[in-house]
Image (tube, coloured by chain):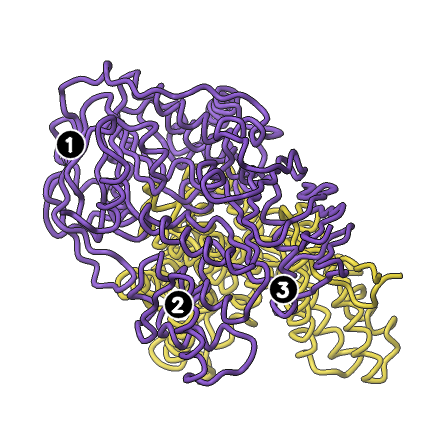
Chain colours: A yellow, B purple
Amino acid sequence: MNSLFPSIVSRSQSSGLMNFFVPIISIVLTLITGSIIFVLLGFDPVYALYTFFISPISSTYGISELFVKATPLALIAIGLSYCFKNNIYNIGAEGQLTMGAIFGGGIGILFHDTNAFWLLPLMIFGGAIGGALWGLIPAILKTKFNTNEILTSLMLVYVALYILDYLVVGPWKDPFGYSFPKSRPFSESGRMPLLFDGLRVHFGLIITLFLIFVSWFIFSKTIFGFQLKVSGYSPKAARYAGFNQTTLVFFAFAICGAFAGIAGLAEVSGPIGLLYRDISPNYGFTAIIVAFLGRLHPIGIIFASLVIALTYLGAEDAQLFLQIPSAVGFIFQGLVLFYLLGAELLINYKLTYKKLL
Amino acid sequence: MSDTILDIENITKSFPRVIANKNVTFDIKKNAVHAILGENGAGKSTLVKILYGLLEPDEGNIKLNNKDFKVNSPAEARKQGIGMVFQHFSLFDSLSVKENLILGIDEKMSYSDLENKLENISSKYNLPLDLDAPITALSAGEKQRVEIVRILLQDPQILIMDEPTSVLTPQEVESLFVTLNALVKEGRTILYITHKLEEVISICDTVTIMRSGEIIDTSSTSNQTAKTLATKMLGQKLDDLKTNYGHIKDEVNFEVKNISCDFNDPFLTDLKNISFQVRVGEIYGIAGVAGNGQSELMDILTGENINIKSGSITFDNKKIEKYGPQKRRDLSISFVPENRLGHSAVPELSLSDNILLSQFPKNNFIKNGIILKNNVDDFANNVINEFKVITPGNDAKASSLSGGNLQKYVIGREISSKPKILIISHPTWGIDAGAEHSIRESLIELSQNGTSIIVISQDLDELIEITHKISVIYDGNLSKPFKTSEVGIEKLGLLMGGKNE
């Protein structure tokens, strides 16, 4: 006879299979918990889940929207993996995204009546620089003063948001905008080209896929990727190997900031077309979930970004058809993270049922 | 039999990848010192953990005084009369001896009761203790005394000692043996876990030899010699290693001069004016009890710490004390720190990947920042073959290897780049005798081919076996060097204990 409760036994080696299954387990558990929540709210769970997860992507437009939302998530998440692989907990991607939007968008506002092929590349470059500079602040604080990057990077998010706030109600306010807190629209050549007529999916997707490919190459083929990994696994071994940890921290933050900055710029020059207060529905924070759900692996991140993007779309549809607040999308995101962290136990431990004597 | 105290029958315990104990059957006589001898990984620790209630056997029975004995926790084991002194002490460093003793026993006891009991124990068993001293101020031998007293306060019938001499100076070992003899005379039984052959012969009455989880033999020690025990323990015959001075050149290629370093940290030992010279092809040993500045010195020798207060390191006429590890490797200096997992190797990475932790100019591993995977794999395969590392392949994770195999791999990695000098800390720490032997052989061979070697080790036998010169580090001071073939073990023991007459 076996005991009722399993005991947790350490695996001699972490399980590669579980590494793959943990995200799937956590998604399944999220769906089950989600249906229970829907039942408690008085909805038919099948209909609710359908509304949430299937109906948003049952049209071409819906699929395009899925990619519109997944683009910034995937781009930021792959940037975050440079930090997370190195055990640097950059929580401030939202701020780096905002700064990227300010720098790149600022260029767009400056050249609002210019139509030239160089404008968009310049804006993208500006976005990258803005995000990278914002990311370097916690890097400097961490390496010079040994501050905790979780706190500094998070606090800088709010600084960046208030700077954006100030700009769109102050100096960068649209003179023809009836005092709405928004900037002038960018010129046509300052906008991300659309990939298909009539759909909002834009060139940012191509940039994202390209940067994911580059990151895959860096992680798996270059000594820089190797150094990030080693210093994440064991700082002592990295010191023994002679890897410069300060440089690694700087690079990880700068790259992550740049990616988030490009994502921010792609948002404002893509679907939005100008700067205003709420340019991002917490993409920078949600991307943390995407990064972990994708196990910091480029391919995993692509899938994870689609899953999480769906919770954004589902929340909108749920609000429309079920009359429940769109915050339910955040509940699903939170559930995924919750189960993910719980299920990670299975990578290094297994459950066994002890025999009762 | 009436004089049997512990009867172990068919104990089997398996772990995910190994069977740690396979049908282990033997009995332990009352009133004796019973040794369990075996290499690392032979299953000794598993067996005593079962006895002490830390592990549950898959199969088998244990009888204590002819009664079924089954415990689920160390507290239960202590209640039934089994106490254990671990190799790594479990004491609160910031508390006093008295406080540690009170905290460590299961029953409630007042300080005055404790003092009465202690006086008795201390005098009877040669275990003097300063009750008010903080643990941090004690030597390893004194800490061990606290552990032993703590167990004795609960009056055990059987005392399990796990590698008790591994951290002691020779003098402290002597005094431990006096204590053990007194305990046995009083009717207690000692289960003595070790891999040191001499100890088995000098203080144990009976010895059980384990290899790969199985009992090889249980017999009286009176008709055994170190050689016969070693053969049974290893299951193969070992060649004697011989110190040979012939190949050493007069030229000094590595010189440390007046290195001092203050850490301002109670857990680190400041280094005081350390100087020594190593000649080409020489193996220079630095002996000492753990915690006397070895790891601090090692960090300075490898370049992981370049913030020294004063002094210089010269290699091949270059001042290198400000060079980091990679710059030193560029000069063909190679190093192996004490800790394998997480320092000289990353357990989560494959063996191939671990090659990249230590790159020398002639390795062709990286081109324009891109890893040349084939070259790295070839190098890894070479190390695996040449140093007989047992592993499914170069893509196996470092954590999947046993301690000895991983150490062979790490040392092989360093030796394969043909360094001019190898600086190595505790080369055979915590590994089995087979691997130990092969590592020592490769170090000797390396020196004969003209590489200088600095070995920092606590294992005096090891240093005497392989080094040409030896000095002792004590409290951050390094003694003058002695020719290994001429210095006596007593002299070294005194220096290790801080007695420089």
The residue mark sitting in front, 2 or 1, is 2
Q: Nearer the viewer, residue A297 or B43?
A: B43
- Residue at x 14%, y 25% (from the top left corner): B252
Q: Given this view, does label 3 or label 2 mark the residue nearer the observer?
A: 2
- Residue position for label 1: B277
Q: For mark 2, what is the residue? A: B122
Q: Position of residue A220 (x, y in %)?
A: 52, 39
Q: Residues within 10 Å of mark 3 (few under 14, many from 20)?
A: some
Q: Secondary structure at mark 2?
A: helix
Q: Which residue is mark 3?
A: A341
Answer above or below: position of A36 versus B155: below
Q: Amino acid at mark 3?
A: Leu
Q: Chain of mark 1?
A: B
Q: Which of these two is toward me, B433 or A188?
A: B433
Q: Tally the marks.
A: 3
Which residue is more in the foreground, B77 or B274?
A: B77
Indicate whether A88 appears above or below A171: above
| Label 3 chain ID | A
